[in-house]
Image (tube, rainbow, N blue to C red):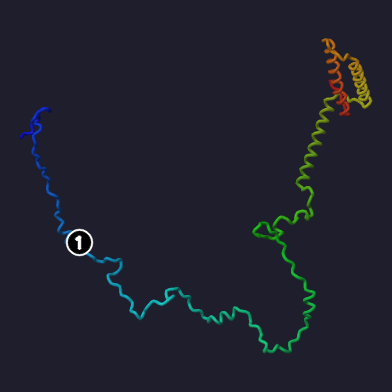
Amino acid sequence: MSDTIYPQESVYNFLLKKKTPISKPPRYVSKFRPAVVQEKKLNKDLKRTMGPARVELPPPEKYLIKHSKEPKLPDSEYPRKDRMRTAQKPRVPARTDKPLMGIHTNRNFVKTVECGVPKKPQPISVDTCKGHKQPLENSGLVPKYIKKKDFGEIPEYLRQRREEERRAQEEYEDFVREQREQAAKERLSDEEREAILEGLKKNRDTLLHEYQGLSLVTDTLSKKARKQHLEEAMDELEKEIDLLQRFKTCFIVD
């Protein structure tokens, strides 16, 4: 029956259809297959191990002895007994041995032992809990520098620097004094200075007496202005009095 497509509701759709067999292409076989099979048969089990095909085994008479493969030291020129004897101390004399006779000496061993000075132990310092120690002299605990001859004295370079600073200050003061003397026309004598100082003090006392006589209640503008004026005048007089008392040399300038 042909593969005609009928409508969906056609009766012919229920008829059995013949299945066409699928034809596969022949399997691929290499033309070198017989040569590969023959080569594999020829080389089979050739040198299966990493070593030679046959290993010669030792005969039963040459069996492996214990410690035979351990390295051995070369033989020394001296036997072991002689080496041990030279490293050891001389043997203790036996009871039957006779002491050496006829040896005389002038040394007094008793006096030497009694008068010998014992060796003083070296002072050390332990600085850790595990016992690490070092000489006490290198630990910084021994006062070395205070025992020097020049300890506590001013170094020479500091003395020179202070002397230069003092000389420069004196030169500056002399220069300022000369400038003031040149700029000033007249110098106040001690009597005039004392007279001016006494006059300033009298004026201050007068203003203070007047200030103390003011009313305690400053409820008007005139009272406040009068009090402020007296305070400013007294402050000015205090500054001038302090200036004359601090400087004994005064000059009169324009």
- In what quadrant of the picture does the C terminus appear? top right
Mark 1 — residue?
Answer: 40
Up-down: is 162 above or below 190? Answer: below
- 223 displayed left or right of 32: right
CA neighbours of label 1 inside 10 A, class few (<14), some (14 to 19), many (20+): few
Q: Identify residue type, mark 1.
A: Lys
Q: How many marks?
A: 1
- Residue placed at 29% from the left, 66% from the top? 49
- At 9% from the left and 37% from the top, the residue drawn is 17
Q: Secondary structure at mark 1?
A: helix
Apparent side of residue 222 relative to residue 63 in the rendered image (left or right): right
Give the image location of residue 216, x and y in percent.
Answer: 87, 15
Q: Choose between 5 and 222: the one closer to the eye.
A: 5
Please state the horizontal and vertical placement of residue 200, each as a whole percent of the image. 90, 21
Image quarter (top left, top right, bottom left or bottom right) of the N terminus: top left
Q: Quadrant of residue 122?
A: bottom right
Name which residue lies at 27% across and 70% down. 53
Toward the viewer: 129 or 80?
129
Q: Outermost residue, left direction?
A: 1
39 versus 204 height, above or below: below
Q: Position of residue 24 (x, y in %)?
A: 12, 45
Q: Where 102 sits versus 138, above or below?
A: below
Which x, y percent locates residue 206? 92, 18
Residue found 51% across the figure and 79% down from its top: 76
Identify which residue, 251 or 234, lies in the foreground: 234
Q: Is residue 122 left or right of residue 253?
A: left
